[in-house]
Protein backbone atom coordinates (compact mmCIF):
# COMPACT_ATOMS: atom_id res chain seq x y z
CA UNK A 1 0.00 0.00 0.00
CA UNK A 2 1.21 3.50 -0.86
CA UNK A 3 1.55 6.07 1.94
CA UNK A 4 -0.78 8.33 -0.07
CA UNK A 5 -3.58 5.81 0.59
CA UNK A 6 -3.29 6.04 4.39
CA UNK A 7 -4.84 9.47 4.94
CA UNK A 8 -1.62 11.41 5.60
CA UNK A 9 -1.34 15.12 4.75
CA UNK A 10 0.80 16.57 1.95
CA UNK A 11 3.59 17.80 4.24
CA UNK A 12 4.12 14.33 5.69
CA UNK A 13 3.95 12.71 2.24
CA UNK A 14 6.73 15.06 1.11
CA UNK A 15 8.82 14.09 4.13
CA UNK A 16 8.21 10.40 3.45
CA UNK A 17 9.27 10.79 -0.18
CA UNK A 18 12.36 12.76 0.87
CA UNK A 19 13.29 9.91 3.24
CA UNK A 20 13.19 7.45 0.35
CA UNK A 21 10.18 5.43 1.51
CA UNK A 22 7.82 4.21 -1.19
CA UNK A 23 5.41 1.61 0.19
CA UNK A 24 4.19 1.18 3.75
CA UNK A 25 5.35 -1.86 5.72
CA UNK A 26 2.65 -4.18 7.14
CA UNK A 27 2.81 -2.60 10.62
CA UNK A 28 2.54 0.90 9.09
CA UNK A 29 -0.28 -0.08 6.75
CA UNK A 30 -2.41 -1.44 9.59
CA UNK A 31 -1.45 0.95 12.41
CA UNK A 32 -1.47 4.40 10.77
CA UNK A 33 -5.21 4.55 9.88
CA UNK A 34 -6.16 3.31 13.36
CA UNK A 35 -3.86 5.80 15.08
CA UNK A 36 -5.09 8.68 12.90
CA UNK A 37 -8.62 7.81 13.97
CA UNK A 38 -7.59 8.16 17.62
CA UNK A 39 -7.90 4.49 18.55
CA UNK A 40 -5.70 2.70 21.10
CA UNK A 41 -3.42 0.20 19.35
CA UNK A 42 -1.31 -2.77 20.45
CA UNK A 43 1.27 -3.50 17.77
CA UNK A 44 3.22 -6.76 17.96
CA UNK A 45 6.23 -6.34 15.71
CA UNK A 46 9.98 -6.76 15.73
CA UNK A 47 12.43 -3.86 15.69
CA UNK A 48 13.24 -3.08 12.07
CA UNK A 49 9.69 -3.45 10.72
CA UNK A 50 9.06 0.30 10.48
CA UNK A 51 7.04 0.77 13.64
CA UNK A 52 8.68 4.11 14.52
CA UNK A 53 7.05 5.72 11.48
CA UNK A 54 3.85 3.81 12.30
CA UNK A 55 3.36 5.90 15.44
CA UNK A 56 5.38 9.00 14.47
CA UNK A 57 3.34 9.93 11.39
CA UNK A 58 -0.09 9.95 13.12
CA UNK A 59 1.33 11.88 16.08
CA UNK A 60 2.79 14.54 13.77
CA UNK A 61 -0.45 14.87 11.81
CA UNK A 62 -2.63 15.18 14.91
CA UNK A 63 -0.54 17.90 16.60
CA UNK A 64 -2.16 21.24 17.34
CA UNK A 65 0.55 23.67 16.19
CA UNK A 66 -0.98 26.57 18.12
CA UNK A 67 -0.62 24.89 21.52
CA UNK A 68 2.66 25.38 23.40
CA UNK A 69 2.30 22.26 25.55
CA UNK A 70 3.51 18.66 25.47
CA UNK A 71 0.92 16.81 23.39
CA UNK A 72 2.61 13.43 22.89
CA UNK A 73 4.91 11.37 25.10
CA UNK A 74 7.03 8.49 23.75
CA UNK A 75 8.74 6.18 26.24
CA UNK A 76 11.75 4.18 25.01
CA UNK A 77 13.82 1.58 26.94
CA UNK A 78 17.29 2.93 26.08
CA UNK A 79 18.87 6.29 25.40
CA UNK A 80 20.11 5.08 21.99
CA UNK A 81 16.60 4.17 20.88
CA UNK A 82 15.21 7.41 22.36
CA UNK A 83 17.72 9.43 20.33
CA UNK A 84 16.94 7.48 17.15
CA UNK A 85 13.21 8.06 17.65
CA UNK A 86 13.74 11.78 18.21
CA UNK A 87 15.83 11.97 15.02
CA UNK A 88 13.14 10.13 13.03
CA UNK A 89 10.44 12.47 14.35
CA UNK A 90 12.56 15.50 13.50
CA UNK A 91 13.20 14.21 9.97
CA UNK A 92 9.54 13.39 9.27
CA UNK A 93 8.18 16.47 11.06
CA UNK A 94 10.50 19.09 9.58
CA UNK A 95 7.80 20.49 7.28
CA UNK A 96 5.32 20.43 10.15
CA UNK A 97 7.73 22.53 12.26
CA UNK A 98 7.08 20.20 15.18
CA UNK A 99 9.36 20.69 18.17
CA UNK A 100 10.68 17.40 19.55
CA UNK A 101 12.93 16.95 22.60
CA UNK A 102 14.58 13.85 24.00
CA UNK A 103 15.53 13.30 27.67
CA UNK A 104 17.61 10.39 28.93
CA UNK A 105 19.91 9.42 31.74
CA UNK A 106 23.66 9.94 31.53
CA UNK A 107 23.21 13.47 30.17
CA UNK A 108 23.29 16.78 32.04
CA UNK A 109 19.78 17.14 33.48
CA UNK A 110 20.20 20.88 34.13
CA UNK A 111 20.75 21.43 30.40
CA UNK A 112 17.60 19.42 29.65
CA UNK A 113 15.68 21.50 32.21
CA UNK A 114 16.81 24.77 30.59
CA UNK A 115 15.80 23.52 27.15
CA UNK A 116 12.39 22.36 28.40
CA UNK A 117 11.80 25.72 30.09
CA UNK A 118 12.86 27.85 27.11
CA UNK A 119 11.06 25.86 24.41
CA UNK A 120 8.25 23.53 25.48
CA UNK A 121 8.25 20.59 23.02
CA UNK A 122 5.10 19.33 21.35
CA UNK A 123 6.54 15.81 21.47
CA UNK A 124 8.69 14.50 24.32
CA UNK A 125 10.75 11.32 23.94
CA UNK A 126 12.44 9.84 26.98
CA UNK A 127 13.66 6.87 28.98
CA UNK A 128 11.63 5.87 32.06
CA UNK A 129 14.17 6.82 34.73
CA UNK A 130 14.90 10.29 33.37
CA UNK A 131 11.22 11.02 32.74
CA UNK A 132 10.48 10.22 36.39
CA UNK A 133 13.34 12.51 37.47
CA UNK A 134 11.77 15.39 35.54
CA UNK A 135 8.29 14.63 36.85
CA UNK A 136 9.51 14.62 40.44
CA UNK A 137 11.32 17.92 39.84
CA UNK A 138 8.16 19.26 38.14
CA UNK A 139 10.20 20.31 35.11
CA UNK A 140 7.73 18.67 32.71
CA UNK A 141 3.93 18.89 32.71
CA UNK A 142 2.03 15.98 31.14
CA UNK A 143 -1.45 17.32 31.88
CA UNK A 144 -2.10 18.11 28.19
CA UNK A 145 -0.66 14.92 26.69
CA UNK A 146 -3.16 13.38 24.26
CA UNK A 147 -1.11 10.45 23.00
CA UNK A 148 1.36 8.21 24.81
CA UNK A 149 3.55 5.58 23.12
CA UNK A 150 5.17 2.65 24.90
CA UNK A 151 7.82 1.42 22.47
CA UNK A 152 9.72 -1.88 22.85
CA UNK A 153 7.54 -2.68 25.87
CA UNK A 154 9.06 -6.13 26.39
CA UNK A 155 12.52 -4.56 26.48
CA UNK A 156 11.35 -2.22 29.24
CA UNK A 157 9.95 -5.22 31.09
CA UNK A 158 13.31 -6.99 30.75
CA UNK A 159 15.10 -3.97 32.16
CA UNK A 160 12.80 -3.68 35.18
CA UNK A 161 10.95 -0.52 34.11
CA UNK A 162 7.36 -1.70 34.46
CA UNK A 163 6.75 0.07 37.78
CA UNK A 164 8.36 3.24 36.40
CA UNK A 165 6.06 3.12 33.39
CA UNK A 166 2.98 2.75 35.59
CA UNK A 167 4.17 5.72 37.69
CA UNK A 168 4.63 7.85 34.55
CA UNK A 169 1.22 6.87 33.18
CA UNK A 170 -0.39 8.00 36.44
CA UNK A 171 0.73 11.56 35.60
CA UNK A 172 -0.97 11.50 32.19
CA UNK A 173 -4.51 12.09 33.40
CA UNK A 174 -6.12 13.34 30.19
CA UNK A 175 -4.62 11.10 27.55
CA UNK A 176 -6.99 10.15 24.75
CA UNK A 177 -4.83 7.55 23.03
CA UNK A 178 -2.25 4.92 24.02
CA UNK A 179 -0.10 3.06 21.50
CA UNK A 180 1.91 0.05 22.71
CA UNK A 181 4.51 -1.79 20.63
CA UNK A 182 6.28 -4.99 21.63
CA UNK A 183 7.95 -7.95 19.92
CA UNK A 184 6.33 -10.33 22.43
CA UNK A 185 3.31 -10.04 24.70
CA UNK A 186 4.12 -11.52 28.13
CA UNK A 187 1.52 -11.25 30.89
CA UNK A 188 2.92 -8.06 32.57
CA UNK A 189 2.63 -6.23 29.22
CA UNK A 190 -0.94 -7.40 28.76
CA UNK A 191 -1.69 -6.23 32.32
CA UNK A 192 -0.56 -2.72 31.35
CA UNK A 193 -2.78 -2.78 28.27
CA UNK A 194 -5.80 -3.86 30.35
CA UNK A 195 -5.15 -1.18 32.96
CA UNK A 196 -4.28 1.81 30.79
CA UNK A 197 -5.84 1.18 27.35
CA UNK A 198 -9.42 1.50 26.12
CA UNK A 199 -10.58 -1.35 23.85
CA UNK A 200 -7.28 -1.44 21.93
CA UNK A 201 -7.08 -2.64 18.35
CA UNK A 202 -4.49 -5.42 18.07
CA UNK A 203 -2.13 -5.47 15.08
CA UNK A 204 0.05 -8.56 14.76
CA UNK A 205 2.65 -9.12 12.09
CA UNK A 206 2.48 -12.75 11.03
CA UNK A 207 5.50 -14.96 11.58
CA UNK A 208 6.24 -15.19 7.88
CA UNK A 209 6.72 -11.41 7.81
CA UNK A 210 9.22 -11.36 10.68
CA UNK A 211 12.78 -10.56 9.62
CA UNK A 212 14.46 -13.70 10.99
CA UNK A 213 13.27 -15.64 7.94
CA UNK A 214 15.58 -13.49 5.83
CA UNK A 215 18.66 -14.29 7.91
CA UNK A 216 21.03 -17.09 6.93
CA UNK A 217 22.22 -18.52 10.24
CA UNK A 218 25.61 -20.26 10.48
CA UNK A 219 27.93 -21.46 13.19
CA UNK A 220 31.69 -21.99 13.21
CA UNK A 221 33.24 -24.45 15.63
CA UNK A 222 36.47 -22.94 16.96
CA UNK A 223 38.68 -22.67 19.99
CA UNK A 224 38.40 -19.36 21.81
CA UNK A 225 41.96 -18.46 20.81
CA UNK A 226 41.14 -19.10 17.12
CA UNK A 227 38.05 -16.93 16.86
CA UNK A 228 39.72 -13.64 15.94
CA UNK A 229 41.79 -14.96 13.04
CA UNK A 230 38.83 -16.93 11.68
CA UNK A 231 36.54 -13.92 11.91
CA UNK A 232 39.03 -11.77 10.03
CA UNK A 233 39.28 -14.37 7.25
CA UNK A 234 35.48 -14.52 7.04
CA UNK A 235 35.27 -10.73 6.83
CA UNK A 236 37.88 -10.73 4.04
CA UNK A 237 35.93 -13.27 1.99
CA UNK A 238 32.44 -11.99 2.76
CA UNK A 239 33.27 -8.26 2.43
CA UNK A 240 30.23 -7.17 4.50
CA UNK A 241 28.79 -3.73 3.80
CA UNK A 242 28.02 -3.16 7.49
CA UNK A 243 28.71 -5.70 10.22
CA UNK A 244 28.04 -5.90 13.96
CA UNK A 245 30.31 -8.04 16.15
CA UNK A 246 28.76 -9.07 19.47
CA UNK A 247 31.03 -9.89 22.40
CA UNK A 248 30.34 -10.71 26.03
CA UNK A 249 32.28 -8.06 28.01
CA UNK A 250 33.43 -4.47 27.83
CA UNK A 251 37.05 -5.61 27.93
CA UNK A 252 36.40 -7.87 24.96
CA UNK A 253 34.90 -4.92 23.03
CA UNK A 254 38.10 -2.92 23.49
CA UNK A 255 40.37 -5.85 22.60
CA UNK A 256 38.51 -6.94 19.48
CA UNK A 257 38.13 -3.34 18.29
CA UNK A 258 41.85 -2.60 18.69
CA UNK A 259 42.70 -5.87 16.96
CA UNK A 260 40.48 -5.12 13.97
CA UNK A 261 41.89 -1.61 13.69
CA UNK A 262 45.45 -2.99 13.84
CA UNK A 263 44.66 -5.22 10.89
CA UNK A 264 43.35 -2.33 8.85
CA UNK A 265 39.60 -2.74 9.29
CA UNK A 266 37.39 0.33 9.69
CA UNK A 267 35.98 -0.61 13.11
CA UNK A 268 34.85 0.99 16.36
CA UNK A 269 33.31 -0.31 19.58
CA UNK A 270 30.61 0.75 22.05
CA UNK A 271 29.94 -0.31 25.63
CA UNK A 272 28.53 1.15 28.84
CA UNK A 273 31.80 2.70 30.05
CA UNK A 274 32.05 5.04 27.06
CA UNK A 275 30.70 8.56 27.46
CA UNK A 276 27.31 9.19 25.94
CA UNK A 277 28.82 11.65 23.46
CA UNK A 278 31.31 9.01 22.32
CA UNK A 279 28.61 6.36 21.88
CA UNK A 280 26.41 8.73 19.89
CA UNK A 281 29.37 9.68 17.69
CA UNK A 282 30.23 6.04 16.95
CA UNK A 283 26.62 5.15 16.15
CA UNK A 284 26.22 8.15 13.84
CA UNK A 285 29.37 7.16 11.92
CA UNK A 286 28.16 3.57 11.64
CA UNK A 287 24.67 4.64 10.55
CA UNK A 288 26.22 6.89 7.89
CA UNK A 289 28.41 3.97 6.64
CA UNK A 290 31.58 5.78 7.71
CA UNK A 291 32.37 2.69 9.78
CA UNK A 292 32.28 -0.85 8.39
CA UNK A 293 32.27 -2.82 11.65
CA UNK A 294 30.66 -2.08 15.02
CA UNK A 295 31.79 -4.11 18.05
CA UNK A 296 29.31 -4.11 20.93
CA UNK A 297 28.00 -5.82 24.04
CA UNK A 298 24.35 -6.87 24.24
CA UNK A 299 23.51 -4.02 26.64
CA UNK A 300 25.12 -1.35 24.45
CA UNK A 301 23.35 -2.66 21.36
CA UNK A 302 19.86 -2.83 22.89
CA UNK A 303 17.44 -0.84 20.77
CA UNK A 304 19.86 -0.30 17.87
CA UNK A 305 17.78 0.39 14.79
CA UNK A 306 20.24 0.62 11.92
CA UNK A 307 19.33 -0.36 8.38
CA UNK A 308 21.83 -1.87 5.98
CA UNK A 309 23.58 -4.28 8.38
CA UNK A 310 24.46 -7.29 6.23
CA UNK A 311 26.32 -9.45 8.77
CA UNK A 312 26.18 -10.21 12.48
CA UNK A 313 29.14 -12.04 14.03
CA UNK A 314 28.44 -13.60 17.43
CA UNK A 315 32.06 -13.63 18.58
CA UNK A 316 30.84 -14.92 21.96
CA UNK A 317 27.68 -17.01 22.02
CA UNK A 318 24.90 -15.13 23.85
CA UNK A 319 23.95 -16.12 27.38
CA UNK A 320 20.33 -16.93 26.53
CA UNK A 321 18.27 -17.67 23.40
CA UNK A 322 16.32 -14.42 23.62
CA UNK A 323 19.53 -12.41 23.33
CA UNK A 324 20.42 -14.47 20.27
CA UNK A 325 17.17 -13.46 18.56
CA UNK A 326 17.78 -9.80 19.39
CA UNK A 327 21.34 -9.99 18.09
CA UNK A 328 20.59 -11.53 14.72
CA UNK A 329 17.64 -9.15 14.37
CA UNK A 330 20.17 -6.36 13.70
CA UNK A 331 20.40 -7.71 10.13
CA UNK A 332 17.84 -8.97 7.62
CA UNK A 333 15.76 -5.77 7.82
CA UNK A 334 13.39 -4.04 5.44
CA UNK A 335 13.12 -7.14 3.26
CA UNK A 336 16.88 -7.48 2.77
CA UNK A 337 18.80 -10.70 3.34
CA UNK A 338 21.36 -10.92 6.12
CA UNK A 339 23.85 -13.39 7.56
CA UNK A 340 24.53 -14.39 11.15
CA UNK A 341 27.67 -16.33 12.08
CA UNK A 342 28.08 -17.65 15.63
CA UNK A 343 31.42 -18.91 17.00
CA UNK A 344 30.91 -21.96 19.16
CA UNK A 345 33.48 -23.82 21.27
CA UNK A 346 32.99 -27.61 21.47
CA UNK A 347 31.53 -27.56 24.98
CA UNK A 348 28.99 -24.92 23.86
CA UNK A 349 27.52 -27.13 21.14
CA UNK A 350 24.82 -28.50 23.48
CA UNK A 351 23.72 -24.98 24.39
CA UNK A 352 23.68 -24.03 20.68
CA UNK A 353 21.23 -26.91 20.08
CA UNK A 354 19.02 -25.45 22.84
CA UNK A 355 18.97 -22.11 21.01
CA UNK A 356 18.03 -23.91 17.78
CA UNK A 357 15.15 -25.71 19.49
CA UNK A 358 13.74 -22.52 20.97
CA UNK A 359 14.12 -20.44 17.79
CA UNK A 360 12.84 -23.28 15.57
CA UNK A 361 15.72 -22.67 13.15
CA UNK A 362 18.83 -24.77 12.67
CA UNK A 363 22.20 -23.12 12.16
CA UNK A 364 24.25 -24.41 9.22
CA UNK A 365 27.84 -25.49 10.01
CA UNK A 366 30.39 -23.29 8.27
CA UNK A 367 34.05 -24.26 7.94
CA UNK A 368 36.36 -21.21 8.04
CA UNK A 369 38.10 -20.08 4.85
CA UNK A 370 41.83 -20.66 4.44
CA UNK A 371 44.45 -17.91 4.38
CA UNK A 372 44.58 -18.22 0.59
CA UNK A 373 40.80 -17.79 0.30
CA UNK A 374 40.99 -14.75 2.58
CA UNK A 375 43.78 -13.26 0.45
CA UNK A 376 41.73 -13.80 -2.70
CA UNK A 377 38.86 -11.99 -1.03
CA UNK A 378 41.13 -9.06 -0.14
CA UNK A 379 42.52 -8.88 -3.66
CA UNK A 380 39.07 -9.00 -5.20
CA UNK A 381 38.08 -5.96 -3.14
CA UNK A 382 41.36 -4.22 -3.99
CA UNK A 383 40.78 -4.78 -7.72
CA UNK A 384 37.34 -3.22 -7.37
CA UNK A 385 38.95 -0.17 -5.76
CA UNK A 386 41.48 0.07 -8.61
CA UNK A 387 38.69 -0.13 -11.21
CA UNK A 388 36.86 2.67 -9.40
CA UNK A 389 40.03 4.78 -9.39
CA UNK A 390 40.45 4.27 -13.13
CA UNK A 391 37.06 5.95 -13.69
CA UNK A 392 38.43 9.19 -12.23
CA UNK A 393 40.48 11.88 -14.00
CA UNK A 394 44.10 10.80 -13.50
CA UNK A 395 45.71 13.27 -15.92
CA UNK A 396 47.79 15.08 -13.27
CA UNK A 397 49.46 11.80 -12.31
CA UNK A 398 50.48 10.83 -15.86
CA UNK A 399 54.01 12.32 -15.82
CA UNK A 400 55.03 10.61 -12.57
CA UNK A 401 53.40 7.39 -13.74
CA UNK A 402 55.46 7.48 -16.92
CA UNK A 403 58.67 7.92 -14.87
CA UNK A 404 57.78 4.86 -12.78
CA UNK A 405 57.13 2.83 -15.92
CA UNK A 406 60.67 3.60 -17.11
CA UNK A 407 62.10 1.87 -14.04
CA UNK A 408 59.48 -0.77 -13.21
CA UNK A 409 57.24 -3.08 -15.16
CA UNK A 410 53.49 -2.48 -15.30
CA UNK A 411 53.00 -5.84 -13.54
CA UNK A 412 55.17 -4.76 -10.60
CA UNK A 413 53.43 -1.40 -10.30
CA UNK A 414 49.96 -2.95 -10.42
CA UNK A 415 51.03 -5.57 -7.86
CA UNK A 416 52.32 -2.84 -5.53
CA UNK A 417 49.03 -0.97 -5.88
CA UNK A 418 47.01 -4.08 -5.06
CA UNK A 419 49.22 -4.80 -2.05
CA UNK A 420 48.73 -1.26 -0.79
CA UNK A 421 44.95 -1.40 -1.20
CA UNK A 422 44.52 -4.82 0.42
CA UNK A 423 44.96 -5.57 4.12
CA UNK A 424 48.18 -7.44 4.81
CA UNK A 425 46.67 -8.84 8.00
CA UNK A 426 48.99 -11.84 7.99
CA UNK A 427 51.80 -9.60 9.23
CA UNK A 428 49.91 -8.53 12.36
CA UNK A 429 49.36 -11.02 15.17
CA UNK A 430 46.46 -10.36 17.54
CA UNK A 431 45.57 -12.32 20.66
CA UNK A 432 42.42 -11.77 22.65
CA UNK A 433 42.20 -12.75 26.32
CA UNK A 434 40.37 -16.06 26.63
CA UNK A 435 37.04 -16.33 28.42
CA UNK A 436 35.35 -19.35 29.88
CA UNK A 437 31.88 -19.97 28.45
CA UNK A 438 29.05 -18.70 30.64
CA UNK A 439 26.62 -21.32 31.96
CA UNK A 440 23.21 -21.31 30.34
CA UNK A 441 20.58 -19.98 32.73
CA UNK A 442 17.39 -21.97 32.57
CA UNK A 443 16.15 -24.55 30.12
CA UNK A 444 13.13 -22.98 28.51
CA UNK A 445 14.08 -19.52 27.31
CA UNK A 446 13.82 -17.90 30.74
CA UNK A 447 15.89 -14.98 31.84
CA UNK A 448 17.00 -14.22 35.36
CA UNK A 449 13.95 -13.69 37.52
CA UNK A 450 12.33 -16.85 36.14
CA UNK A 451 10.11 -14.97 33.74
CA UNK A 452 9.28 -16.81 30.55
CA UNK A 453 9.31 -14.87 27.32
CA UNK A 454 8.08 -15.57 23.82
CA UNK A 455 10.50 -17.61 21.83
CA UNK A 456 10.09 -16.28 18.32
CA UNK A 457 8.68 -19.15 16.28
CA UNK A 458 10.64 -18.35 13.15
CA UNK A 459 10.25 -20.43 10.05
CA UNK A 460 12.05 -20.45 6.80
CA UNK A 461 13.82 -23.75 6.12
CA UNK A 462 17.27 -24.13 4.70
CA UNK A 463 18.75 -21.37 2.60
CA UNK A 464 21.82 -21.43 0.40
CA UNK A 465 24.41 -18.91 1.43
CA UNK A 466 24.56 -16.17 -1.15
CA UNK A 467 28.35 -16.06 -1.19
CA UNK A 468 30.52 -19.09 -0.44
CA UNK A 469 30.39 -22.19 1.74
CA UNK A 470 33.78 -23.03 3.15
CA UNK A 471 35.12 -26.46 3.96
CA UNK A 472 37.76 -27.18 6.50
CA UNK A 473 38.79 -29.29 9.45
CA UNK A 474 37.31 -29.54 12.92
CA UNK A 475 38.60 -27.51 15.85
CA UNK A 476 39.06 -28.68 19.40
CA UNK A 477 38.22 -26.70 22.53
CA UNK A 478 40.76 -24.25 23.89
CA UNK A 479 42.91 -25.21 26.84
CA UNK A 480 41.48 -22.50 29.07
CA UNK A 481 44.75 -20.60 29.39
CA UNK A 482 44.53 -16.82 29.40
CA UNK A 483 46.30 -14.68 26.84
CA UNK A 484 47.07 -11.00 27.12
CA UNK A 485 45.97 -8.83 24.20
CA UNK A 486 49.00 -8.41 21.92
CA UNK A 487 49.57 -6.70 18.60
CA UNK A 488 52.95 -7.42 17.07
CA UNK A 489 54.68 -8.27 13.85
CA UNK A 490 55.09 -11.97 13.16
CA UNK A 491 58.56 -11.18 11.87
CA UNK A 492 59.75 -10.34 15.40
Image: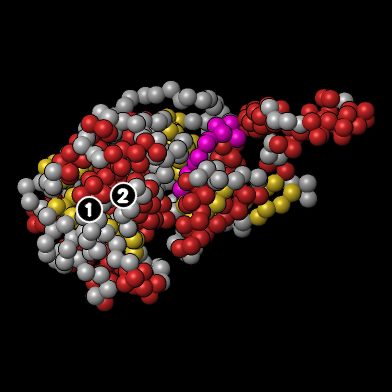
Q: Could you classify mark 1 by the number of other residues whose Cα lies within 10 Å: few (under 14), some (14-19), or many (20 or more)? A: some
Q: Residue at x 52, y 49 (%)?
A: 285
Q: Is residue 84 visible?
A: no
Q: Which residues are magenta?
A: 236-249
Instruction: Point out residue 169 in the picture as x, y percentages from the top left corner.
Output: 16, 63
Q: Which residue is mark 1?
A: 63
Q: Is residue 389 left or right of residue 32?
A: right
Give coordinates of residue 413: x percent, y percent.
Answer: 82, 30
Q: Kindly state the secondary structure of the residue where label 1 is placed.
A: loop
Q: Between marks 2 and 1, how big is the CA–CA gap?
A: 9 Å
Quarter of the N terminus within the rendering = top left
Which residue was labeled with disc 2? 96
Quarter-of-image position of residue 454: top left
Nearer to the camera, 473 or 120: 120
> Is-magenta flag for residue 475?
no
Taking the spot 53% from the left edge, 25% from the top edge, the residue there is 468
**Which residue is at the front of the view, 204 or 366?**
204
Do we see residue 8 in this rendering? yes
Q: How many marks?
A: 2
Amino acid sequence: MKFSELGLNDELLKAIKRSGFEEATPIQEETIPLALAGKDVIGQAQTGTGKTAAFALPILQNLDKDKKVIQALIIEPTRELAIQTQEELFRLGRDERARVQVVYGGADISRQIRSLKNHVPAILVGTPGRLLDHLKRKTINLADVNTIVLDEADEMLDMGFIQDIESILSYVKNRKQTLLFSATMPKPIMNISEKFMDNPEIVRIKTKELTADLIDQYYVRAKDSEKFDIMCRLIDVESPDLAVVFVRTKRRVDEVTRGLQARGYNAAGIHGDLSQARRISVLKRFRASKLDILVATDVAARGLDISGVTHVYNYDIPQDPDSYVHRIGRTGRAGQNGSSITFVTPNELGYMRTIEQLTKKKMTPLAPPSDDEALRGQLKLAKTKVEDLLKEDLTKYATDAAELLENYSAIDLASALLKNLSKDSSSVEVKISSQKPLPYKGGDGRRSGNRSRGRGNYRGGDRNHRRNNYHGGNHSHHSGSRHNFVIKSKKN
